[in-house]
Image (tube, rainbow, N blue to C red):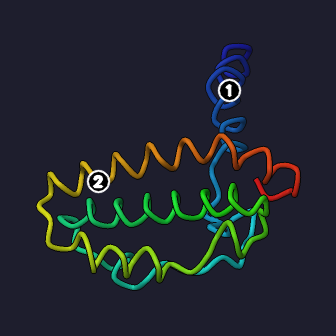
Amino acid sequence: MMKAILFSLVVLTPSIASADFVPTLNNTPRICPDRPAKPDWMTNFNVKDAHKVNLVEEMYRAQSLRAVVESGDCTCATRFPSWAAASDYYFANYAGLSRHEILDRTSDYRRTANVHRRAAQPICEAQGNW
């Protein structure tokens, strides 16, 4: 009997405790929950085109963080603007590039966004939007 109790404590307890750490499927962002949705083409894409979506996401991120730094404002409208500017710029300037060229541009935008992030984060934290 003692072995059965000990077995249940050792084997069953971790599974009960781990149930507390199951991630939820709530996709509502904590900050600015009413942010604009991505364009349909970015949510319903062929997996072979993921690099294109990544480029537009990094363009958007760089654009919004730069706007926060330049304005000193981190309202939801500034931090999460419409996707139209980034999407339109992609189609006007990058849609015809090769995969390798798109990956290079993505890296450039990621670096730019990370530079702006360092300056934008304190502004956004002060306004409760980080």
**Residue 51 sits in quarter:** bottom left
The residue located at (37%, 82%) in the rendering is 88
Q: Secondary structure at mark 1?
A: helix
Q: CA distance from mark 1 to mark 2?
A: 55 Å
**Residue 69 sits in quarter:** bottom right
Q: Amino acid at mark 2?
A: Arg
User: The N terminus appears in which quarter of the rendering?
Assistant: top right
Graded by Cα atoms within 10 Å as few (under 14), some (14 to 19) or many (20 or more), the crowding at tag 1 reads few
Q: Position of residue 113 (x, y in %)?
A: 51, 50
Q: Position of residue 87 (x, y in %)?
A: 39, 78
Is tag 1's residue or tag 2's residue first in the polypeptide sequence? 1
Q: Amino acid at mark 1?
A: Ser
The residue located at (74%, 14%) in the rendering is 2
In the image, taking residue 76 as reference, residue 52 lies left or right, namely left
Q: Position of residue 109 (x, y in %)?
A: 40, 52
Of tags 1 and 2, which is closer to the observer? Answer: 2
In the image, taking residue 23 as reference, residue 83 lies left or right, namely left
The residue located at (61%, 57%) in the rendering is 65
Residue 10 vs residue 52, the one in the foreground: 52
Say above or below: 1 vs 119: above
Graded by Cα atoms within 10 Å as few (under 14), some (14 to 19) or many (20 or more), the crowding at tag 2 reads some
**Residue 24 sits in quarter:** bottom right
The residue located at (43%, 48%) in the rendering is 110
Q: Position of residue 100 (x, y in %)?
A: 14, 51
Q: Which residue is mark 2?
A: 105
Q: Secondary structure at mark 2?
A: helix
Give residue 8's mark: 1
